[in-house]
Image (spheres, helix red, strand yellow):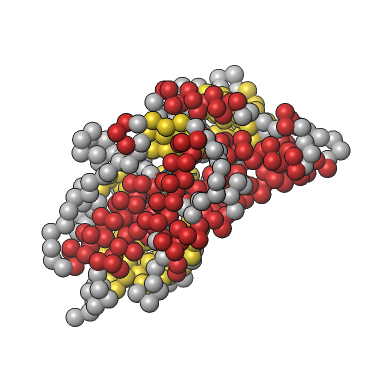
Amino acid sequence: MSKPKVVVLGAGYAGLVATRRLTQKLSADEAEIVLINKHNYHYESTWLHEVAAGTINPNQARFMLTDAVNPKRVRLIYDTVTEVNRDEQRVILDNSEVSYDYLVFALGFVSNTFGIPGMDEHAFAITDIDSSRHIAEHIEYQFAQYSTDENKNDDQLTILVGGGGFTGIEFVGELADKVPELCQKYDIDRSKARIINVEAAPSILPVFDDDLVSYAKKALEDRGVEFRIGAPIKECTEEGFIVGDDKELIKAGTVVWTGGVTGNPVLAKSGYELFKGKVNVGPDLRPEGEENVFIVGDCSWTLDQETGRPYPPTGQLATQEGAQVAENISALIRNQPIQDFVYSNKGTVASLGLSDGIGNVLNGNKLRGKSAAAMKKVVDDRSLFLVGGPKVLLKKGKFRPF
Ligand code: FAD
């Protein structure tokens, strides 16, 4: 009898952890493992705000898949998934097709602009290495061009960031580090360059308590970030955002949308019923009616049995789900019972640039300032270790003092 074929879609947190664990759990005789990803590298999505601001080199935030998985044990396919034909158990790629016995759907997130007119057309989004690098290059180009322009327009130096959630705030924190550097490099008066964060809700950073939010806001304001809170963006144009009921136009040379993400559109193309862009999965991470498919990370909603609400999508959740899926697929292949997923919350830390941050860590302890920034580096390095292993951690880890 031929070996069962396990196909993993996406080499992000969930997909890569699942693949690595599958190779540890199952022998080569027990299963064939296939990992399909758009690129030949994994990137740390949780570091993309740094790439987008230009505070780290894009290569630090990515590593080759062959550094993390053995290509003799895992068949690596670098191609784009367009659809899954669930009836025929086939994955359709841009350049070929692959059949499966077990499928892990881990294709991550895409930007969601909630239908705000002009946002898709005129704003950048932080979604992968290329889109993030493009933002950093665009910002630097604005500063370089301004410095040589005879008819200077200060709006060119304004960076407008839509969304005051985790990504938006971590991004403006990096910009607060980067902008003074750019001003110095291009001999520009720092007061001419503005960083403006626009948020529709009454507060930024909804995942943190008020005292930590106040700390973050003040720390960023002290470093030159301006906030427009409770200010819904009505439209995005070539010039900037149109904000609030009085339709004020805030002009900028760089406009970035960080206000929302949703599940990969391949889910819809594959015929899944979606709830806010993702698939509801059961406690064992399988969608209803499919015994051999697991949907994880930012592609699914997993219910917290205690609160009855879905867990917020995070790298931490995706990593843990990836590990559980490997356990469950191994169990299925060995005709053993599978286990429900149990989330272990290790806390949440947000960076505010290289040397500042806020965090809720274990036992309700709160961190702010340098201790939070140090903890954030520990979290980032731990993630690298879990996803890529010790060799990757040594190559790409954040060991730089601050
Ligand atoms: P991803 O990690 O996004 O991986 C998806 C993979 O699928 C990628 O490799 C992608 O290239 C590949 N792929 C996508 N489409 C296709 C296709 N059609 N064909 C083939 N391959 C494809 N979470 C935290 O826990 N802590 C944080 O501090 C944090 N900070 C964040 C900061 C930023 C700037 C962003 C953007 C997110 C942050 N998050 C954070 C959220 C976290 O990054 C996501 O929840 C996490 O990446 C989801 O993991 P995943 O495995 O589902 O998908």
The quadrant where residue 156 appears: top right
111 versus 331 height, above or below? above
> In x, y percent, where is residue 175?
61, 38
Q: Is residue 272 visible?
A: no
Left or right, 53 with reference to 323 = right
Left or right, 335 with reference to 318 = left
Q: Residue at x 50, y 48 (%)?
A: 47
Quick one: quadrant of the N terminus? Answer: bottom left
| Relative depth, front residue between 276 and 317 | 317
Q: Residue at x 23, y 59 (%)?
A: 327
* Residue located farthest toward the top when viewing the structure as drawn: 246
The quadrant where residue 206 appears: top left
237 versus 272 height, above or below? above
| Relative depth, front residue between 266 and 61 | 61
| Relative depth, front residue between 400 and 203 | 400
> In x, y percent, where is residue 145?
78, 44
Q: Residue at x 49, y 39 (%)?
A: 373
243 versus 5 height, above or below? above
| Relative depth, front residue between 180 and 94 | 180
Number of labelled discs?
0
* Residue located farthest toward the bottom when viewing the structure as drawn: 1
> In x, y percent, where is residue 242?
60, 28
Q: Is residue 290 visible?
A: yes
Quick one: quadrant of the C terminus? Answer: top right
Q: Residue at x 35, y 58 (%)?
A: 17
> In x, y percent, where is residue 278?
34, 46
